[in-house]
Amino acid sequence: MTQVARNDGAPGGAQPDGLRAEARRRRLTTAAFLAPAAFFLIIWLVYPTVATVWRSLFDRSGDEFVWLSNYKAIFTTDTLVKALQNNVLWVAVVPALVTAIGLVLAVLTERIRWQVAFRLALFMPMAISLFAAGVIWRIMDEKDPSQGTLNASIGAVRDALGGSGSVLPNAVPSTEGLTGSLQTGFYVKAPVQAGGQALIGLTGIAPTALPASAKQAAAPAAAPGTITGVVWRDFKPGGGTPGQVEPEELGVPGATVELRKSGSTAAIQTAKTDDAGAFTFKDVGSGDFTVGASKDSFGPPYAGVSWLGSKLINPAVMIAYIWVWAGFAMVIIAAGLAAISREVLEAARTDGATEWQVFRRVTAPMLAPVLSVVFITMLINVLKVFDIVLSVAPASSQDDANVIALAMWRTSFGGVNDFGLGSAIAVLLLVLVLPALALNVRRFKREQ
Amino acid sequence: MTTASADQPVPSTKPAPAAAAPKKDGFATKIGRWTRRAPLQIFLMLVALAWLVPTLGLFFTSLLPADLISQEGWWKVVSDPSVATFANYRAVFDNEALVSSLWVTLQIAVGNTVLLVLVAALAGYAFAWLEFPGRDALFVVVIGLLVVPLQVALIPIFSIYNDAHLFDTVLGLILFHVAFGLPFGIFLMRNFFVGIPKDLLESARIDGASEITIFFKLMLPLALPAIASLAIFQFLWTWNDLIVALTFARDTKPITVEIFSQLRQFGTNIELIAPASFLSMIIPLVVFFAFQKSFANGLLAGSVK
């Protein structure tokens, strides 16, 4: 075992030679501890940073020195400008939203018994890759409401609120007595007067297209001053007479029926059919009327929001990203909350402060450092956002969802292969995170 | 927060003192409290559900048979469990590219984590307890490197890897991940070592132990909590990496890159993407649930990365 220099040793009596040997041994030891890290940091971080800055001043091939024209290109190329704009949007929206959600949830979960389970559920997305999170949300965001969870939920809410009864995308009239199309609605050709009846028979309706509530079709009895009628599925297995309401033929519930003055296209009354397909217009007055099932009854079913299309792709990616990071914010802020002394809070309460005042005057100021850490961390993360854009946005919307880090990769390795411009984008990214670097260094110096 | 020591208690698993000791209340009081808190409870349950549904949705989607997967939503499995099948998973395990990509991912994640922990602990110890000129200045440099985006290194390293035959190799990916994990690793380890009582170290030195002995016999065992945090963090980070592998791997693909290349034809092969994505998540999730305490510690210790 080698004798190593003692920090507390008194060097007075030692030989100068021995001292020097000891100093040399100490330097060697230090070097042995630091050399592996230095090797990695210099080759993979320090040298590349310098090389990238240098490379950004050259053209695509690397042969010609072009000064700053790569940087100029960043601000004049459409897809790159879009990337910058999107990153501004990300910076403006996401860090604040993540911090706010984290704060609210951290405060609320302090009061529940199952907070461990809750925090685990929210924290879990942190463990999986942003890329896999993107795949998850790509499935959530599917446009077809029969597949995409988000649109299925929206569709369910619409149905619950009694949205349009558009259930008959393929209906056709059963007789020549009706005119019109799916786009205009189907109307009875013959004019109807007060006291009359309108029979609107339709075929081309799959049995499953009618709601389970549909009953045997039946027209209400005619009455003076009113126009009544029925919209029904005019089809009976094994035959039947078109244009006549017969047993075993079901009414069409929820269809929208319109009453118009003959010759006009404006509805003066509308009604919904009941479960037997029946409808009634009251107090119609005199004259000729046109009655029919309006186009609302035949519109295509709810088609779903196009989350992954060019318009909504940014919010769609951001939702996925917030889903991943909210748990992080919550856990860090909860740690800050837990560190606030209970006595201070109790003292404030004893002094008669309301819960809101306690939060506003005591908790929030004491949490400020933690909140800023979360906010700044998210700011840096958001500037580097990459994987999740690539996996949520389909190829067709990637230009619309472009962000700086993705633009850098696509420019350098995604087919364009322009290392000059790619380097310039990377340097821009570096410059954008420099304030965070300064902040870190300052914090370290203050703590020394 | 940046210097929070790694042995800090984990907030997520520590009940707030207010909730820790419920007093014995009458039945009426309990009911009263429950009704007052019910809106909060219900709201939080909905939030938790909203956070769980996406992941469960992926899992249920992966159980749909191939002929239903492009027509039905995942809830089909819930409403009609009889359609659920593991056939898609069997197809994944029959797919050689996917299986080998899982193996590559494991090699990269384990290899770089072990190497990183060793290198970072050595340097962290030096920054904490060895005297050398310019120590603080160098540590400031390390802190500075903490925020350097890896995009800055992609192009030069791409050239180096081509010349050094490290392109498309597991080793090349491991080395890159170690380098970019180091600033955080050194930072975390140094802050942990600084917190170790000076007396302990001094007495070992007086006893004549060499620094190497002190490091391996005394410091490393003491630093296990910090090492666990760092290792879990690095393991998850590199298991989940996409951009590095996408740049430096062509045939030696980890799972994320393999799924990414499948994703280009999304819609035609969800029956492969869904189970493969879920498989790629299982190991990170197991690691996360098994070591969530260390994971949270790592986050707390270095939330400015």
Image (cartoon, coloured by chain):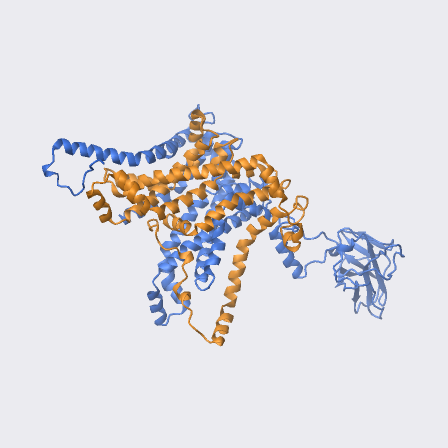
Q: Nearer the viewer, residue A257 or B110?
A: B110
Residue A115 image position (x, y, % from top left): 46, 60
The chain that appears blue in the image is A
* Quadrant in which the N terminus of chain A appears: top left
The image shows residue B104, relative to residue A261, as above or below, that is above
Q: What residue is drawn where x is 53% and y is 61%?
A: B45
Residue A343 image position (x, y, % from top left): 33, 66
Q: Residue furthest front?
A: A1
The image shows residue A216, relative to residue A185, as above or below, that is below
Q: Nearer the viewer, residue B3 or A262?
A: B3
Q: What residue is drawn where x is 36% and y is 63%?
A: A362
Please tell me in which quadrant of the rendered image residue A20 appears: top left
Residue B254 visible in the displayed image: no
Q: Residue furthest left?
A: A13
The image shows residue A133, relative to residue A64, as above or below, that is below
The image shows residue A25, relative to residue A250, as above or below, that is above
The reply, left or right, for residue A415 in relation to residue A170 is left
The reply, left or right, for residue A204 in relation to residue B118 is right
Residue B233 image position (x, y, % from top left): 42, 45
Residue A381 visible in the displayed image: yes
Q: What residue is drawn where x is 19% and y is 38%?
A: A5
Please tell me in which quadrant of the rendered image residue A242 appears: bottom right
Chain B: give its colour. orange
Residue B1 image position (x, y, % from top left): 35, 51
